[in-house]
Image: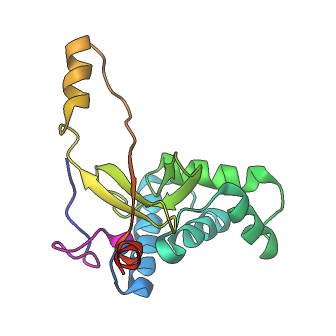
């Protein structure tokens, strides 16, 4: 099931990570969605969890755990790896972030609170990442799994290429 685009994501344009948008509004909307979802589910959205989500929302870039830990350390949130890993585990478990396998990094979810199967478009030149929803029934993976009696519980779709900015630079 795909989810409708958020108000700050154009329906006919590129995925949010590659599109120009009102970033302050985008960050505020994502934080408000996380706070509301945590409140509805009676789960704690601690200052560290909030700050890690803010770091992930900064520029819609994938960030490694140690990069996040360095920022947390600089801001006085702690200096031990479990600080970052626990926050990242919380954010991914509750659908506020995704792990980008190819980069061994994390990115904020563009559709928190909506059931969706994300695909990630990763620029091989600048490491920009864009999330875009895909139909889970699309492609041959589901058909192959069904034919063999396998039940898919989680699939990660990552494509590598050039983002619009790098593609324009390569064409010049």
Q: Any magenta on residue 9?
A: yes
Per the rendered image, the range of residues in magenta is 7-17
As drawn, 59 above or below 66? below
Depth check: give the residue in front, 53 or 98: 98
As drawn, 151 above or below 17? above
- Kindly indicate the quadrant of the structure image that contains residue 140: top left
Q: Could you tell me how many numbered marks the image carries?
A: 0
Give the residue displayed 45% in from the left and 78% down from the top: 27
Colour style of the rendered protein structure: rainbow
As drawn, 106 above or below 166? above
Q: Position of residue 9 (x, y in %)?
A: 27, 75
Depth check: give the residue in front, 37 or 59: 59
Give the residue displayed 63% in from the left and 70% down from the top: 51
As drawn, is 25 to the left or to the right of 87?
Answer: left
Give the residue displayed 65% in from the left and 68% down from the top: 47
Image quarter in which the C terminus is found: bottom left
């Amino acid at each position: 099931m795909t989810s409708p685009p958020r108000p700050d994501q154009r329906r006919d344009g590129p995925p949010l990570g590659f599109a120009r948008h009102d970033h302050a509004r985008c960050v505020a909307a994502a934080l408000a969605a996380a706070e509301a979802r945590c409140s509805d589910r009676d789960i704690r959205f601690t200052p560290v969890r909030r700050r890690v989500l803010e770091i992930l929302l900064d520029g819609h870039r994938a960030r490694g755990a140690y990069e996040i830990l360095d920022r947390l350390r600089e801001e006085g949130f702690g200096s031990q790896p479990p600080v970052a890993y626990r926050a990242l585990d919380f954010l991914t478990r509750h659908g506020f972030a995704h792990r980008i396998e190819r980069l061994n990094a994390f990115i904020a979810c563009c559709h928190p609170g909506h059931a969706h199967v994300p695909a990630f478009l990763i620029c091989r030149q600048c490491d920009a990442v864009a999330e875009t929803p895909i139909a889970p029934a699309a492609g041959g993976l589901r058909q192959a799994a069904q034919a063999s009696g396998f039940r898919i519980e989680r699939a990660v779709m990552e494509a590598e290429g050039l983002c619009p900015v790098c593609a324009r630079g390569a064409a010049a």
